[in-house]
Image (cartoon, helix red, strand yellow):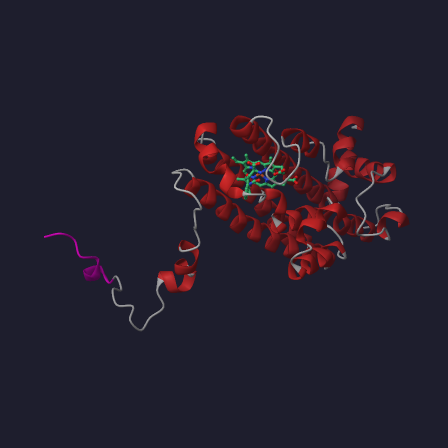
Amino acid sequence: MTYDPSRDGAEMDFRRRMSYGDYLATDQILTAQHPLSTAHDEMLFIIQHQTSELWMKLALYELDAARRAIAADRTAEATKMLARISRIFEQLNSAWDVLRTMTPSEYTRFRDALGQSSGFQSWQYRLIEFAVGNRNLAMLKPHEHRPDLLALLEAELARPSLYDEVLRRLARLGLPVPDAVLTRDLRAPWVEDAAVTATWETVYRDPAAHWEAYELAEKLVDFEDYFRRWRFNHVTTVERVIGFKRGTGGTAGISYLRRMLEVELFPELWRVRTVL
Ligand code: HEM
Ligand SMILES: N[C@@H](CC(=O)c1ccccc1NC=O)C(=O)O
């Protein structure tokens, strides 16, 4: 006879119990795919973006908790969360392998249906950029039609970024951090600071004496490393699929994305490598 798992105790009756689907709201998630064309690959495109948005949601959750932990001098907890955020980006990086199976011929069959929509308008992506310190106020504009989302982005800009929190922690640990850095206008983009590079140099020259700062630094570098790989995978996939066409979001496409490859989140942590 075929195997019956209920003989091993598997619960089979969920009329009055919470099931897998109840707990995970799979009904909502699995009915949220609405292709606008009959092109076979549009389902891949939708699910690729939806899963990315879910991982971004978790990254934001961890970024929030990590910053609160650093601000409360609970660095060990924060480093664990930062390690997880890097792994999330590793996951996002691997996902490009699935999307890359879509050829230009296949994408062209449904690209027109996307209208002017674009990843450029992903508010979770923009929140991540703002949370880690890449604060460009021009990126608020595409969200003006959604006051709720604009408020979320504005609230993020009013808050210290991940890098701000780490530098504040360094100051509390007795390391020299300029007052101008500690009291900077949080909405403004980060401006590279030679005194901060000098402080990181102190940390990296004697890790044992500055272990907490050293660990935080390496977690930040690790994260930026994975984030750069995400940008690079994106731009390479875009060139492979649409070449040098303009983006649906209105930018020039590849040249815009290549410019974004130059963004440095924690410039002093990269600069310090040269002087060690
Ligand atoms: C065939 C696949 C894809 C193509 C051809 C593509 C193309 C583009 C282009 C041309 C832009 C520049 C903005 C514009 O003018 O539209 C852009 C931006 C963006 N895309 Fe994609 N994309 C693809 C897949 C993805 C995926 C899977 C994600 C994951 C969520 C994503 C997220 C983003 C984000 C966040 C931006 C804004 C980047 C920034 O401002 O730095 N894209 N994309
Ligand atoms: N910007 C892309 C379209 C695109 O990729 C896209 C469209 C709608 C929602 C998410 C998208 N992903 C990344 O930009 C293009 O120009 O083909």
Q: Is residue 189 above or below residue 26?
A: above
Q: Nearer the viewer, residue 131 or 199?
A: 131
Residue 6 visible, this angle: yes
Name the residue located 49 percent from the left edge and 42 percent from the top edge. Answer: 113
Count the marks: how many? 0
Residue 135 visible? The answer is: no
Q: Which residues are magenta?
A: 1-9
The reply, left or right, for residue 28 in relation to residue 120 is left
Identify which residue, 39 or 204, lies in the foreground. Answer: 39
Q: Which residue is nearer to you in this view: 189 or 13?
A: 189
Q: Residue furthest right?
A: 179
Q: What x and y, as percent, mark residue 169? A: 77, 52
Does the stretch in magenta take in 13?
A: no
Q: Is 185 above or below relative to 196?
A: below
Query: Could you say which quadrant of the image residue 247 lies in?
Result: top right
**Which residue sits furthest left?**
1
Report x, y in % for residue 218: 68, 39
Does the segment drawn in magenta span residue 7? yes
Residue 129, horizontal then vertical, whole percent: 68, 46
Q: Please tell me in which quadrant of the rendered image residue 254 appears.
A: top right
Q: Quadrant of ligand 2?
A: top right
Is 226 situated left or right of 18 in this image? right
Task: Residue at 45% x, 28% y: name it.
Answer: 105
Query: Which quadrant: the C terminus?
Result: top right
The residue drawn where x is 79% and y is 38% is: 200
